[in-house]
Image (cartoon, grey):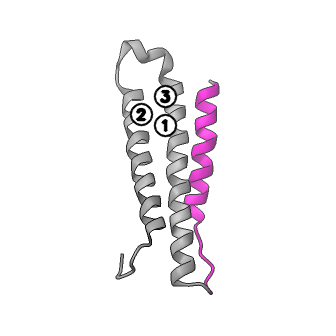
């Protein structure tokens, strides 16, 4: 990361984010597979995948915010995309579960 040493906290956030990404992606894959026994639960599986994906975005935002405070304490950090997609994932997750 451009010569910047990550703190223990940042490393933990990245580990949590990576685990959540793998779980979310796995659930999305399961939700599109033609498995007859899961046909009735595809929306629920997708919804849970979106919510877990939102958790990954939250972990990313926490890590980015912590790193920005250490490296550029006087600069405003702009995290528009993770904020928008994190909120979008939350909304999509709730909509899929409620359908």
User: For residue 27, which numbered disc appears in the image?
Assistant: 2
> Magenta stretch: dominant SS?
helix
**Relative height, residue 45 to residue 59 (above, below):** above
Q: Which of the two discs, 2 and 1, labels the residue nearer the N terminus?
A: 2
Q: Residues within 10 Å of mark 2 (few under 14, many from 20)?
A: some
Q: Is residue 77 left or right of residue 3?
A: right
Cα distance between the residues tagged 3 and 2: 6 Å
Q: Is residue 38 left or right of residue 66?
A: left
Residue ID at (49%, 32%): 46
Cα distance between the residues tagged 2 and 1: 6 Å
The verdict on residue 95 being magenta is yes
User: For residue 49, which numbered disc appears in the image?
Assistant: 1
Q: Label 3, secondary structure: give it.
A: helix
The verdict on residue 86 being magenta is yes
- Image-quadrant location for residue 65: bottom right
Do the CB atoms of the residues marked 3 and 1 lie less than 8 Å apart?
yes
- Image-quadrant location for residue 29: top left
Residue 34 x %, y % = 35, 20
Do the CB atoms of the residues marked 3 and 2 lie less than 8 Å apart?
yes
Residue ID at (39%, 78%): 5
């Amino acid at each position: 990361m451009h010569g910047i040493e990550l703190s223990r906290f940042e490393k933990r956030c990245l580990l949590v984010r990576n685990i959540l990404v793998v779980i979310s992606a796995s659930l999305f894959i399961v939700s599109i597979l033609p498995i007859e026994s899961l046909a009735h639960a595809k929306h629920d599986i997708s919804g849970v995948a979106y919510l877990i994906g939102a958790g990954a975005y939250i972990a990313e935002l926490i890590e980015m915010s912590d790193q920005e405070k250490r490296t550029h304490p006087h600069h405003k950090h702009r995290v528009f995309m993770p904020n928008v997609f994190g909120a979008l994932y939350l909304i999509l997750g709730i909509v899929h579960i409620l359908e």
